[in-house]
Structure formats: C-alpha cells, structure tokens
Image: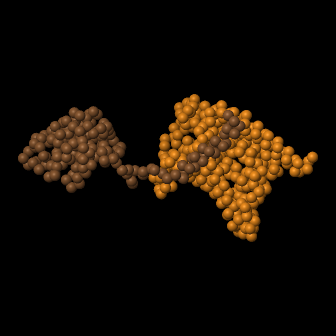
Chain colours: A orange, B brown
Amino acid sequence: METFFWIDKLVLVLLLFLISLGIAAYQTYFERKLAGWIQDRVGPDRAGKFGILQPIADGVKMFMKEDFTPANADKWLFILGPGIAMFTSLITSSIIPWGTDLQLFGRSISLQVAEINIGILFAFGIISIGVYGIMIGGWASNNKYSLFGAIRASSQMISYELAMGISAITIIMISGSLDLRAIVESQHGMNWNIFYQPVAFVVFFICALAETNRAPFDLPECENELIGGYHTEYSSMKLGLFLFSEYVAMFVSSALMAILFFGGYNFPGMDYLKDSPNLLSLISVMVFFAKIFVFIFVFMWIRWTIPRFRFDQLMHLGWKVLIPIALVNMLITGFVVALYEHWF
Amino acid sequence: MTFMEKLYIPAIIKGMLVTFRHILKRRKTIKYPEETREFAPVYRGMHVLKRDEQGRENCTACGLCAVACPAEAITMTSAERTKEQKDLYREEKYASMYEINMLRCIFCGLCEEACPKEAIFLTDRLVPTQFERGEFIYGKDKLVESKEHRIDITKRQFTGKRSTI
C-alpha cells in the first residue's frame, strides 16, 4: 500500500511537471498567435505546420545563447533569482485537485499530489514568495533598470496581495474550509461560487493579473521604459526560466481561479456518471483543463487589448479601490453567512 | 467622469470586444515566399540588361546611366567589339564589366530614363536577401537576361514614357 502510494504520487508529480512545462511552452506559442490575430497578422507559422514547432525552436534558441553574467552582479543571487521564480510557480500545482479519484488496479488514486488541509494558505504563501525571485534577480543584476523593475514588483505585490487574500477569504467563509478539495466539492455540479461572489471574483481576477505580472500590470518588466525591467541583464536559459515561470504562474493562477470561483473540475450533470468513476475522472480533468484554458485565453486577450497602467494609477487601484471593495464584500458575506447559520 | 465611466469595466469590455472582432477577421497577410503580391506595371525592382531580337546585348557602355544615378551605384568599363563578337553585342562598343551595387541603389529608375539604347530596365523582380554585403554587387552574370529566358518589360515600355521603336 505504502509503496503504491509513493509510486502513484511520483507518477503524478512527473506528469504534472511535464504538463505544466508543456502547457507553458505552448502558451508562448498561443500568446504570439493570438497577438497576431488581434493585430490582423497570422503570427508564427514557419516552424512546422501552423508553426506548431515554434516553442521547440524557441527553447533550442534559448539554450544555444551565450549565458552571460554581468561583471558586478552577485553571482549566487543572480542564479537564485530565476530559480526561485521557476520553483515557486511550479510547486503551486502540487496542491491543486485536478479531478475526481481514478479507480485503477483496485485502488482509488487521488489526482492531487499533496492533500493538505490548508491548501489555500499554502498557495498564497508560495505565490508571494514568487516575487522574491524577481526582486533578487533584479537586485543581483546590479543594473538601475533591473532594480526599478524589482522595486515595482515588490510594491505591486504588497498592494495586490491584500485584496486578493480578502477576496479569497470570502470564498473560505461560504465554503467553510481552507482545503482546496473541500472548496471544489462544495461547488458540486453547477453550484459554482461565481454565482454567489461575482464581486470577489472580479477583485481576485484583477489581482491575479497583477500577481502574475501580466499586462495591464506588467510594470516590473515594462519593455518600453525599463527595457525588460528585472530581466534586463539576463540571457540564455536564465531569461528563459523567468519568462517560463511567468507562463507557469499564469497556468497555476488560472487553475486557482477555476477552483475558487468556477467549480474546479465540477460540471453540470456529473451525477449521471456516478457508475463509471474512471470516465467521470477523465471528463472532470478535461473540464478542469477547459476552464483553465478559457482563463488563459482571457489573460492573453486582456494583454493585447489594454495598455499598461501608470505606476500611481496601479497603486491607486490597489489601495483605494480594490481593498475597500474586497473588505465591504467580505463584511456583507460574513453578515449573510452569520444570518444563514442562525447566529443572531 | 460619471460613476459608470469610473468603473472602467464597461469600457474595458467594449475594448475587448473590438479586439475579439479582429480575431475573427480574415487576415490580409501575403505569405511572401509562397505567394507574391501583384505588382504595379511600372514597379521598380531589380534591373535587367536587355538583348535585342537577335540576342545581342543592347548596352553600349556609354555611361549615361552611371552619370544619371543619384546613388552612384553603377560602375562599368567599356571595350571594343571584335569581328567575332558581332552577334554578341549590337554596337561597336560594349560593357566588358557592368556592376550595380544593389545596397546603394535606391530604385529611382533614372538609369532607365537616361539609357539611349533601351538596354537597362527595372523589372518587377525583387532583389533576394543575402548574408554578405559583397553578394549584393550584381555583375553582368546576374543583370543580363539570358537568350532563352527573356525578361518581359513590355508593360514598362508601353507606359508612354518612351516611344516603342
């Protein structure tokens, strides 16, 4: 039993690692394609049919480039920066329940690597460590532009983490658990949290954009004023790791949003499949991925529509708009939950 | 701003609908090496040195094109035709070397304008890209049309700029 348990988990970890990297790679391709379509172009179409091999070509290019470290950079921190960024964005996927249990070889296999009962706290903790990768990378480069990027990343982080946390608290209130699987199971079928908490969702979504450094909040990298921001001095696969971690983070935060607000792997009519758990499991995984892809599409769609915020506008939005909205929303939710539970 | 405008979200959604419509639009991109766009009849592209009906080179190396060239892209040396070369060159004098630097050329068409012998024409062909600068200096091997594959310049000749004779 114990050995089977470890084998299951190891296989799952390996699969998740490959899937997250593969999806991140093809996100870069799709991002460029979508950018092209939105701008009435065709996007990359030279490598393979429809340019389907473009991510591989990009990866090979990244590896072949010269790995350059600036003379006055802090060598260890310079390497640590992209490492932390990549590590934190990959590790979050371990707590995500990807689907209902599989029934294989007479055993029930859970599609979740770490079934910890404080999943959501873990996720927020890890996500906020993610900014350290950017900060350390930007600081260690010994470059003014990189430092500016790092400073922007950290101040952006403190102004958005709060609103994000508060809007997640409202979800915890109505589902009554910090466990991600419990949160998903409380939204069984079509009973999704988005119908109860649309305001919290909007706040959470905006914060997720800021959290993953996506446009319109991509101030830390800001190509035109900071020439790349925190990764100005990076080259080769270290730069690749930074860019990659952004896409993995996008994938993971899409998954988190799908779990918290759109019912995770739940889909309407899943009770009809109770008798065939494997089919149910397969479909639930597919449904979950479909939701994630919709979010990724919206992320990219926003990126190619809205121009970047100015820094004071970003701070204004974070502190003076989102946090009050999230707080009021949390108070109202608390009141309604208390009424529902007959506390008065 | 009114309250609705301050919310920004309606405006953002409006903008996103605009970009979404562009996703569904037909793309006008011409994928160059596979398909080429249609050129105007008087398009000024790569030069050709014409031969006459009997396959003799028209150019007599008078140097008027080089003088007319504002970019100073044309160089040539002339030589006298011998008796054996009578079916190679139309006039007694011919260009033994004729070079156009395609990186200098601005494709203004003044060489064609200046030519008294109807020898040089700009065509609708494009100058292909190269990796080395030296490869852009086109000699007679690339400029003179071959006897079998004549380059069609009738569109240019009938634009009323010069008489057809």
Which of the 4 quarters of the picture holds residue A240? Answer: top right
Question: Quick check: A325 above or below B17?
Answer: above
**Residue sitting at x 18%, y 48%:** B51
Which residue is painted at 58% across and 54% down in the image? Answer: A22
Describe residue A124's horizontal placement relative to residue B22 as left or right: right
A66, A127: nearer the viewer: A127
Which one is in front, B45 or A123? Answer: B45
Q: Kindly give the residue lying farthest to the right in the view shown.
A: A344
Residue A252, given in percent of the width and then of the height, sits at: 66, 49
Regarding residue A74, the answer to whether it shows in the image is no
In depth, the one of A168 and B38 nearer the eye is B38
Q: Does residue A66 show up?
A: yes
Residue A50 x/y as whole percent: 49, 55
Q: Is residue B61 left or right of residue A301?
A: left
Outermost residue to the left: B83
What is the count of numbered marks?
0
Q: Look at the image and tell me in which quarter the N terminus of chain A lies.
A: bottom right
Q: Position of residue B74 (x, y in %)?
A: 24, 37
Q: Position of residue B107 (x, y in %)?
A: 30, 39
Question: Which residue corresponds to the image point at 17% horizontal and 40% vertical from the top-left?
Answer: B116
In terms of depth relative to the viewer, which is nearer, A230 or B3?
B3
User: In the visual, does A47 lie left or right of A276?
Assistant: left
Single out the residue that lies furthest toward the front. B160
**Residue at 68% in and 51% down:** A255
Q: In which image quadrant can residue B9 be found?
A: top right
Image quadrant of residue A266?
Answer: bottom right
Taking A56 as reference, is B105 left or right?
left
